[in-house]
Image (cartoon, helix red, strand yellow):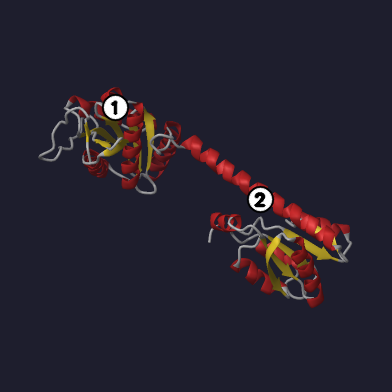
Amino acid sequence: MNEAGWQQARGERDLATILVIDDSDSARAEIRSALGASGRVGTILEAADGLAGLRLLLAHAVDAVICDLEMPGLDGEKLLAACRTQPGREEVPFLFLTANRDPERLARLLRRGASDTILKPFHPVELIARLELQLRLMRLQAELREKNATLARISTTDLVTGLRTRRYVGELLAIEVLRATRYRMPLAVLMADLDHFKRVNDEHGHRAGDAVLAGVGEVIRGALRACDAAGRYGGEEIVIVLPQTDLEGAGVLAERLRQAIEHAAFDIGGGVRLGVTVSIGVAALDGKVRSAEELVEAADAALYGAKAAGRNRVALAPGLRGVDTPAGSRTPEPARGRKP
Protein backbone atom coordinates (compact mmCIF):
# COMPACT_ATOMS: atom_id res chain seq x y z
CA MET A 1 0.00 0.00 0.00
CA ASN A 2 1.41 3.44 -0.91
CA GLU A 3 1.59 6.48 1.35
CA ALA A 4 -1.72 7.89 0.09
CA GLY A 5 -3.39 4.60 0.97
CA TRP A 6 -1.97 4.58 4.47
CA GLN A 7 -3.00 8.20 4.99
CA GLN A 8 -6.54 7.38 3.85
CA ALA A 9 -6.67 4.39 6.18
CA ARG A 10 -5.62 6.60 9.06
CA GLY A 11 -8.22 9.22 8.21
CA GLU A 12 -11.03 6.67 8.25
CA ARG A 13 -10.43 5.76 11.90
CA ASP A 14 -11.72 7.84 14.81
CA LEU A 15 -9.33 6.29 17.34
CA ALA A 16 -5.58 5.88 16.98
CA THR A 17 -3.62 2.69 16.49
CA ILE A 18 -0.50 2.65 18.64
CA LEU A 19 2.40 0.23 18.44
CA VAL A 20 4.08 -0.46 21.80
CA ILE A 21 7.54 -2.05 21.72
CA ASP A 22 9.28 -3.02 24.97
CA ASP A 23 11.09 -6.16 26.09
CA SER A 24 9.51 -5.85 29.56
CA ASP A 25 6.07 -7.38 30.05
CA SER A 26 5.37 -5.13 33.03
CA ALA A 27 6.42 -1.98 31.10
CA ARG A 28 4.09 -2.89 28.22
CA ALA A 29 1.26 -3.49 30.67
CA GLU A 30 1.83 -0.07 32.25
CA ILE A 31 1.80 1.64 28.85
CA ARG A 32 -1.26 -0.34 27.79
CA SER A 33 -3.10 0.77 30.92
CA ALA A 34 -2.27 4.44 30.31
CA LEU A 35 -3.36 4.25 26.66
CA GLY A 36 -6.60 2.47 27.50
CA ALA A 37 -7.54 5.11 30.07
CA SER A 38 -6.89 7.98 27.65
CA GLY A 39 -9.95 7.37 25.45
CA ARG A 40 -7.89 8.29 22.38
CA VAL A 41 -6.62 4.84 21.40
CA GLY A 42 -8.64 2.19 19.62
CA THR A 43 -6.02 -0.46 18.88
CA ILE A 44 -2.83 -1.32 20.73
CA LEU A 45 -0.27 -3.51 18.96
CA GLU A 46 2.49 -4.99 21.09
CA ALA A 47 5.95 -6.38 20.40
CA ALA A 48 8.61 -7.67 22.82
CA ASP A 49 11.61 -6.76 20.64
CA GLY A 50 12.63 -4.47 17.82
CA LEU A 51 12.46 -7.03 15.03
CA ALA A 52 8.91 -8.08 15.94
CA GLY A 53 8.00 -4.41 16.20
CA LEU A 54 9.34 -3.72 12.70
CA ARG A 55 7.21 -6.55 11.29
CA LEU A 56 4.08 -5.10 12.90
CA LEU A 57 4.98 -1.63 11.70
CA LEU A 58 5.24 -2.83 8.11
CA ALA A 59 2.03 -4.85 8.29
CA HIS A 60 -0.28 -2.27 9.88
CA ALA A 61 -1.24 1.38 9.47
CA VAL A 62 0.16 2.74 12.73
CA ASP A 63 -0.46 6.26 14.00
CA ALA A 64 2.43 6.32 16.47
CA VAL A 65 5.10 4.11 18.05
CA ILE A 66 5.96 4.09 21.75
CA CYS A 67 9.27 2.28 22.03
CA ASP A 68 11.83 1.37 24.65
CA LEU A 69 15.24 2.67 23.64
CA GLU A 70 17.37 -0.13 25.05
CA MET A 71 16.42 -3.58 23.75
CA PRO A 72 18.44 -6.66 22.84
CA GLY A 73 19.12 -7.15 19.11
CA LEU A 74 17.40 -4.38 17.21
CA ASP A 75 17.30 -1.52 19.69
CA GLY A 76 15.10 1.56 19.41
CA GLU A 77 17.63 3.67 17.52
CA LYS A 78 18.22 0.98 14.88
CA LEU A 79 14.49 0.39 14.59
CA LEU A 80 13.94 4.09 13.94
CA ALA A 81 16.56 4.07 11.18
CA ALA A 82 14.97 1.00 9.58
CA CYS A 83 11.51 2.56 9.73
CA ARG A 84 12.60 5.79 8.04
CA THR A 85 13.69 3.88 4.93
CA GLN A 86 10.25 2.30 4.41
CA PRO A 87 7.84 4.04 2.00
CA GLY A 88 4.83 5.40 3.85
CA ARG A 89 6.52 5.07 7.25
CA GLU A 90 8.91 8.01 7.07
CA GLU A 91 6.73 10.26 9.23
CA VAL A 92 5.26 7.84 11.78
CA PRO A 93 5.90 9.48 15.18
CA PHE A 94 8.37 7.64 17.44
CA LEU A 95 8.21 8.36 21.17
CA PHE A 96 11.12 6.78 23.04
CA LEU A 97 10.97 5.71 26.66
CA THR A 98 14.40 5.58 28.26
CA ALA A 99 16.24 5.79 31.58
CA ASN A 100 19.27 7.11 29.71
CA ARG A 101 19.80 10.76 30.60
CA ASP A 102 22.78 11.33 28.31
CA PRO A 103 21.91 14.62 26.52
CA GLU A 104 24.12 13.73 23.54
CA ARG A 105 22.28 10.44 23.01
CA LEU A 106 18.87 12.05 23.36
CA ALA A 107 19.82 14.88 21.00
CA ARG A 108 21.08 12.37 18.43
CA LEU A 109 17.73 10.55 18.54
CA LEU A 110 15.84 13.75 17.82
CA ARG A 111 18.17 14.64 14.93
CA ARG A 112 17.62 11.19 13.41
CA GLY A 113 13.86 11.55 13.38
CA ALA A 114 12.54 10.74 16.83
CA SER A 115 9.46 12.76 17.72
CA ASP A 116 10.01 12.83 21.48
CA THR A 117 11.92 11.23 24.34
CA ILE A 118 10.33 10.49 27.70
CA LEU A 119 12.42 9.65 30.73
CA LYS A 120 11.63 6.62 32.86
CA PRO A 121 9.90 6.30 35.20
CA PHE A 122 7.18 8.19 33.32
CA HIS A 123 3.85 9.52 34.55
CA PRO A 124 0.83 8.31 32.51
CA VAL A 125 -0.53 11.86 32.24
CA GLU A 126 2.73 13.07 30.68
CA LEU A 127 2.88 10.12 28.26
CA ILE A 128 -0.66 10.72 27.01
CA ALA A 129 -0.13 14.48 26.67
CA ARG A 130 2.99 13.98 24.57
CA LEU A 131 1.27 11.33 22.48
CA GLU A 132 -1.75 13.57 21.86
CA LEU A 133 0.58 16.34 20.69
CA GLN A 134 2.18 14.04 18.11
CA LEU A 135 -1.18 12.76 16.89
CA ARG A 136 -2.41 16.33 16.50
CA LEU A 137 0.72 17.28 14.55
CA MET A 138 0.29 14.27 12.29
CA ARG A 139 -3.32 15.23 11.58
CA LEU A 140 -2.36 18.82 10.77
CA GLN A 141 0.45 17.65 8.48
CA ALA A 142 -1.93 15.31 6.64
CA GLU A 143 -4.43 18.15 6.18
CA LEU A 144 -1.65 20.42 4.89
CA ARG A 145 -0.48 17.81 2.39
CA GLU A 146 -4.04 17.35 1.17
CA LYS A 147 -4.55 21.09 0.74
CA ASN A 148 -1.22 21.47 -1.06
CA ALA A 149 -2.14 18.60 -3.40
CA THR A 150 -5.48 20.26 -4.10
CA LEU A 151 -3.81 23.60 -4.83
CA ALA A 152 -1.28 21.92 -7.13
CA ARG A 153 -4.07 20.14 -8.97
CA ILE A 154 -6.10 23.32 -9.35
CA SER A 155 -3.11 25.32 -10.58
CA THR A 156 -2.32 22.81 -13.34
CA THR A 157 -5.84 21.69 -14.33
CA ASP A 158 -8.44 23.54 -16.34
CA LEU A 159 -11.62 23.48 -14.26
CA VAL A 160 -13.98 23.26 -17.25
CA THR A 161 -12.41 20.55 -19.41
CA GLY A 162 -10.49 18.65 -16.76
CA LEU A 163 -7.45 18.89 -19.04
CA ARG A 164 -4.18 20.54 -18.13
CA THR A 165 -3.67 24.29 -18.29
CA ARG A 166 -1.94 25.99 -21.21
CA ARG A 167 1.03 26.88 -19.03
CA TYR A 168 1.47 23.32 -17.80
CA VAL A 169 1.37 21.82 -21.30
CA GLY A 170 3.68 24.54 -22.63
CA GLU A 171 6.31 23.80 -20.00
CA LEU A 172 5.92 20.05 -20.54
CA LEU A 173 6.29 20.44 -24.31
CA ALA A 174 9.51 22.41 -23.87
CA ILE A 175 10.93 19.57 -21.76
CA GLU A 176 9.77 16.91 -24.22
CA VAL A 177 11.38 18.77 -27.13
CA LEU A 178 14.71 18.79 -25.28
CA ARG A 179 14.34 15.09 -24.46
CA ALA A 180 13.35 14.14 -28.02
CA THR A 181 16.20 16.16 -29.50
CA ARG A 182 18.81 14.78 -27.13
CA TYR A 183 17.82 11.12 -27.54
CA ARG A 184 16.60 11.39 -31.14
CA MET A 185 13.09 10.26 -30.33
CA PRO A 186 9.93 11.25 -32.23
CA LEU A 187 7.58 13.86 -30.80
CA ALA A 188 4.28 15.10 -32.17
CA VAL A 189 1.67 17.71 -31.28
CA LEU A 190 -2.03 17.90 -32.09
CA MET A 191 -3.88 21.19 -32.17
CA ALA A 192 -7.64 20.65 -32.01
CA ASP A 193 -10.45 23.18 -32.30
CA LEU A 194 -14.21 22.55 -31.99
CA ASP A 195 -16.07 23.56 -35.13
CA HIS A 196 -18.61 26.41 -34.94
CA PHE A 197 -18.34 26.40 -31.17
CA LYS A 198 -19.44 30.02 -30.87
CA ARG A 199 -22.86 28.92 -32.10
CA VAL A 200 -23.10 26.47 -29.20
CA ASN A 201 -22.68 29.31 -26.72
CA ASP A 202 -24.92 31.68 -28.67
CA GLU A 203 -27.79 29.21 -29.16
CA HIS A 204 -27.60 27.18 -25.94
CA GLY A 205 -25.73 29.38 -23.47
CA HIS A 206 -22.29 29.23 -21.90
CA ARG A 207 -23.32 26.58 -19.39
CA ALA A 208 -24.12 24.26 -22.29
CA GLY A 209 -20.80 25.21 -23.88
CA ASP A 210 -18.96 24.28 -20.71
CA ALA A 211 -20.79 20.94 -20.60
CA VAL A 212 -19.68 20.20 -24.15
CA LEU A 213 -16.09 21.17 -23.37
CA ALA A 214 -16.14 18.91 -20.31
CA GLY A 215 -17.43 16.03 -22.42
CA VAL A 216 -14.81 16.57 -25.11
CA GLY A 217 -12.12 16.69 -22.42
CA GLU A 218 -13.32 13.34 -21.09
CA VAL A 219 -13.20 11.79 -24.57
CA ILE A 220 -9.65 13.05 -25.08
CA ARG A 221 -8.40 11.89 -21.68
CA GLY A 222 -9.80 8.43 -22.35
CA ALA A 223 -7.84 8.12 -25.59
CA LEU A 224 -4.40 9.16 -24.32
CA ARG A 225 -1.55 7.21 -22.79
CA ALA A 226 -0.15 8.01 -19.38
CA CYS A 227 2.84 9.75 -20.99
CA ASP A 228 0.66 11.99 -23.20
CA ALA A 229 -0.69 15.34 -22.07
CA ALA A 230 -3.62 17.44 -23.27
CA GLY A 231 -4.36 20.99 -22.25
CA ARG A 232 -6.88 23.70 -22.97
CA TYR A 233 -4.93 26.15 -25.09
CA GLY A 234 -7.62 28.81 -25.16
CA GLY A 235 -11.39 28.95 -25.64
CA GLU A 236 -12.32 25.74 -27.46
CA GLU A 237 -8.78 25.04 -28.65
CA ILE A 238 -6.90 22.05 -27.22
CA VAL A 239 -3.23 21.10 -27.60
CA ILE A 240 -2.08 17.50 -27.16
CA VAL A 241 1.56 16.50 -26.63
CA LEU A 242 2.51 13.00 -27.83
CA PRO A 243 6.00 11.85 -26.78
CA GLN A 244 7.61 9.00 -28.75
CA THR A 245 5.04 9.43 -31.52
CA ASP A 246 5.86 10.15 -35.16
CA LEU A 247 3.74 12.12 -37.62
CA GLU A 248 1.93 9.07 -38.96
CA GLY A 249 1.08 7.73 -35.51
CA ALA A 250 -0.13 11.16 -34.41
CA GLY A 251 -2.32 11.36 -37.50
CA VAL A 252 -3.90 8.01 -36.67
CA LEU A 253 -4.68 9.16 -33.11
CA ALA A 254 -6.02 12.48 -34.38
CA GLU A 255 -8.42 10.71 -36.74
CA ARG A 256 -9.54 8.42 -33.92
CA LEU A 257 -10.25 11.44 -31.72
CA ARG A 258 -12.08 13.20 -34.55
CA GLN A 259 -14.38 10.24 -35.06
CA ALA A 260 -14.96 9.74 -31.32
CA ILE A 261 -16.00 13.37 -30.85
CA GLU A 262 -18.14 13.39 -34.00
CA HIS A 263 -20.08 10.33 -32.82
CA ALA A 264 -20.49 11.53 -29.22
CA ALA A 265 -23.50 13.41 -27.84
CA PHE A 266 -22.94 15.56 -24.76
CA ASP A 267 -25.55 16.12 -22.07
CA ILE A 268 -26.18 19.88 -21.67
CA GLY A 269 -29.11 19.51 -19.27
CA GLY A 270 -32.85 19.50 -19.70
CA GLY A 271 -32.77 16.11 -21.39
CA VAL A 272 -30.91 17.57 -24.38
CA ARG A 273 -27.74 16.12 -25.83
CA LEU A 274 -25.58 18.12 -28.19
CA GLY A 275 -23.25 16.93 -30.94
CA VAL A 276 -20.14 18.78 -32.16
CA THR A 277 -17.25 18.11 -34.48
CA VAL A 278 -13.57 18.95 -34.31
CA SER A 279 -10.79 19.93 -36.69
CA ILE A 280 -7.27 18.80 -35.83
CA GLY A 281 -3.85 19.87 -37.03
CA VAL A 282 -0.87 17.53 -36.65
CA ALA A 283 2.84 18.36 -36.55
CA ALA A 284 6.02 16.54 -35.53
CA LEU A 285 9.65 17.37 -34.95
CA ASP A 286 11.73 17.16 -38.14
CA GLY A 287 14.56 18.97 -39.86
CA LYS A 288 12.57 22.19 -40.15
CA VAL A 289 10.52 22.09 -36.96
CA ARG A 290 12.96 22.00 -34.07
CA SER A 291 11.55 23.97 -31.13
CA ALA A 292 8.43 23.86 -29.01
CA GLU A 293 7.24 27.16 -30.49
CA GLU A 294 7.78 25.98 -34.06
CA LEU A 295 6.00 22.70 -33.29
CA VAL A 296 2.91 24.48 -31.96
CA GLU A 297 2.98 26.92 -34.88
CA ALA A 298 3.18 24.05 -37.37
CA ALA A 299 0.26 22.23 -35.74
CA ASP A 300 -1.72 25.48 -35.67
CA ALA A 301 -1.04 26.04 -39.36
CA ALA A 302 -2.24 22.51 -40.08
CA LEU A 303 -5.36 23.21 -38.03
CA TYR A 304 -5.99 26.33 -40.12
CA GLY A 305 -5.69 24.15 -43.22
CA ALA A 306 -8.24 21.68 -41.84
CA LYS A 307 -10.65 24.53 -41.14
CA ALA A 308 -10.16 26.01 -44.61
CA ALA A 309 -10.74 22.62 -46.22
CA GLY A 310 -14.21 22.33 -44.69
CA ARG A 311 -13.74 21.44 -41.00
CA ASN A 312 -14.36 18.10 -39.26
CA ARG A 313 -11.12 16.69 -40.58
CA VAL A 314 -7.46 16.07 -39.75
CA ALA A 315 -4.63 17.80 -41.57
CA LEU A 316 -0.89 17.34 -41.29
CA ALA A 317 1.56 20.22 -41.14
CA PRO A 318 1.85 22.16 -44.46
CA GLY A 319 3.98 20.50 -47.11
CA LEU A 320 3.11 16.99 -45.89
CA ARG A 321 0.39 14.65 -47.00
CA GLY A 322 -3.05 15.04 -45.46
CA VAL A 323 -5.19 12.55 -43.60
CA ASP A 324 -8.38 11.82 -45.53
CA THR A 325 -11.68 11.96 -43.71
CA PRO A 326 -13.27 8.48 -43.97
CA ALA A 327 -15.88 7.85 -46.63
CA GLY A 328 -19.37 8.71 -45.45
CA SER A 329 -18.18 11.49 -43.20
CA ARG A 330 -19.20 15.01 -44.16
CA THR A 331 -18.73 18.58 -43.22
CA PRO A 332 -21.28 18.97 -40.43
CA GLU A 333 -24.14 21.35 -40.11
CA PRO A 334 -23.91 23.80 -37.19
CA ALA A 335 -24.18 22.11 -33.78
CA ARG A 336 -27.74 21.37 -32.86
CA GLY A 337 -29.62 20.06 -29.87
CA ARG A 338 -31.33 16.70 -30.05
CA LYS A 339 -33.22 14.53 -27.62
CA PRO A 340 -31.49 11.35 -26.45
* Badge 2 density bin: few <14, some 14–19, many ≥20, Cα 10 Å: some
Where is 94 relative to 200, above or below? below
Residue hosting label 1 = 204
Left or right for 223, reference 333:
right
Left or right for 258, reference 127:
left
State the residue at coordinates (60%, 46%). 145
* Badge 1 density bin: few <14, some 14–19, many ≥20, Cα 10 Å: some
> Which of the 4 image quarters holds residue 261?
top left
**Amino acid at the residue labelled 1:** His
Left or right for 179, reference 108:
left
Residue 210: x and y, percent? 36, 32
> Which of the 4 image quarters holds residue 256?
top left
State the residue at coordinates (35%, 37%). 214
State the residue at coordinates (71%, 57%). 93
Residue 115: x and y, percent? 75, 55
Where is 282 relative to 66, above or below? above
Q: Secondary structure at mark 1?
A: helix
Q: Which label is found at residue 47?
A: none
Q: Which one is nearer the viewer's eye here, 121 or 321? A: 121
Q: Nearer the viewer, mark 2 or mark 1?
A: 1
Left or right for 101, reference 178:
right
Q: Which one is nearer the viewer's eye here, 263 or 331? A: 263
Most extreme residue toward the bottom is: 25
**Alpha carbon of mark 2 to alpha carbon of mark 1: how far?**
46 Å
> Which of the 4 image quarters holds residue 118?
bottom right
**Amino acid at the residue labelled 2:** Arg
Residue hosting label 2 = 139
State the residue at coordinates (32%, 32%). 289
- Residue 223 can be seen, yes or no: yes
Q: Secondary structure at mark 2?
A: helix
| Image label count | 2
